[in-house]
């Protein structure tokens, strides 16, 4: 059972900035005008919430949680369609589990967006055969070769400090790990995302 708490504070300017930066990236990729994209994602939000409306205008009454739900949908879209991110990448919520999950699922580096390997945040140990591990029991992240190597050279805390991460690594379900080709011994009913 997973508890989720709603943050009823008004949607933040930082969330608005991220939303419009990501729409700029989608516009560069698709050619669709930003106003059209805004209405498209607002409509998707209304459909997914069964009628709730959202606005990220300065005087919005929508909450931080509602804005996060909208942003999660935009981030999923970007990963699903492999939209190149330029404007919004530094604003992306790297410490949020949904973003980290999408990075792992689509093998995109958490730091720079390049193709990624799966990094074990919790040490596996030298000489262990990773094909015989249950990866659902470890916290994972997606890092390109360069950032993966840096992570292991400077360590977890220094890496998080350098890239301003408040949390790194999530547990991922066996089906997702199998779908991205991460071999291992997975127990039935393993970790759920």
Image: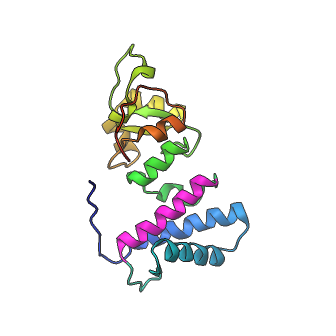
Q: Which residue sits furthest front?
A: 188
What residue occupies the far bottom of the structure in this picture?
59
Report the magenta stretch's main SS.
helix
Does residue 100 appear left or right of residue 146 in this picture?
A: left
Identify the residue at image location x=59%, y=78%. Answer: 39
Q: Position of residue 82 (x, y in %)?
A: 63, 51
Among the 4 quarters of the image, the one containing residue 43 = bottom right
Query: What segment carries the magenta color?
Result: 63-81
Q: Is residue 138 visible?
A: no
Q: Is residue 128 above or below residue 46?
A: above
Q: Is residue 145 above or below residue 193?
A: above
User: Which residue of the protein is positioned furthest toward the right in this rendering?
Assistant: 31
Q: Residue at x 40, y 37 (%)?
A: 140
Answer with left or right where residue 41 lies relative to residue 135.
right
Q: Is residue 118 above or below residue 70?
A: above
Give the percent coordinates (x, y) of residue 165.
36, 48
At 38% from the left edge and 24% from the top edge, which residue is drawn?
Answer: 133
Q: Is residue 78 magenta?
A: yes
Observer able to see residue 90: yes
Count of numbered marks:
0
Q: Which image quadrant is residue 4 in?
A: bottom left
**Residue 7: x %, y % from top left:** 29, 70
Q: Nearer the viewer, residue 168 or 4?
A: 4
Q: Which quadrant: the N terminus? A: bottom left
Q: Does the stretch in magenta take in 110?
A: no
Q: Residue furthest top?
A: 127
- Name the residue nearer the viewer: 46 or 165: 46
In the rendered view, how is the structure colored? rainbow
Residue 153 in the figure: left or right of residue 2: right
User: x, y (%) of residue 109?
Assistant: 52, 42
Residue at 43% in and 56% down: 93
């Amino acid at each position: 059972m997973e508890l989720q708490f709603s943050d009823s504070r008004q949607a933040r300017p930082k969330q608005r900035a991220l939303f419009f930066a990501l729409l700029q990236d989608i516009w560069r990729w698709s050619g669709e005008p930003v106003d059209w994209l805004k209405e498209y994602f607002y409509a998707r939000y209304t459909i997914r919430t069964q009628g709730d409306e959202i606005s990220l205008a300065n005087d919005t009454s929508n909450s931080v949680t509602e804005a996060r739900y909208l942003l999660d949908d935009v981030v999923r879209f970007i990963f699903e369609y492999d939209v190149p991110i330029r404007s919004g990448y530094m604003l992306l919520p790297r410490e949020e589990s949904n973003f980290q999950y999408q990075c792992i699922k689509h093998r995109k580096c958490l730091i720079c967006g390049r193709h990624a390997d799966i990094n074990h945040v919790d040490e596996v140990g030298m000489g262990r055969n990773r094909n015989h591990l249950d990866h659902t029991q470890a916290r994972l992240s997606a890092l390109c070769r360069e950032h993966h190597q840096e992570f292991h050279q400077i360590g977890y805390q220094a890496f998080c400090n350098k890239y301003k991460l408040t949390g790194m690594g999530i547990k991922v379900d066996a089906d997702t790990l199998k779908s991205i080709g991460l071999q291992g011994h997975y127990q039935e009913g393993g970790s759920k995302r």
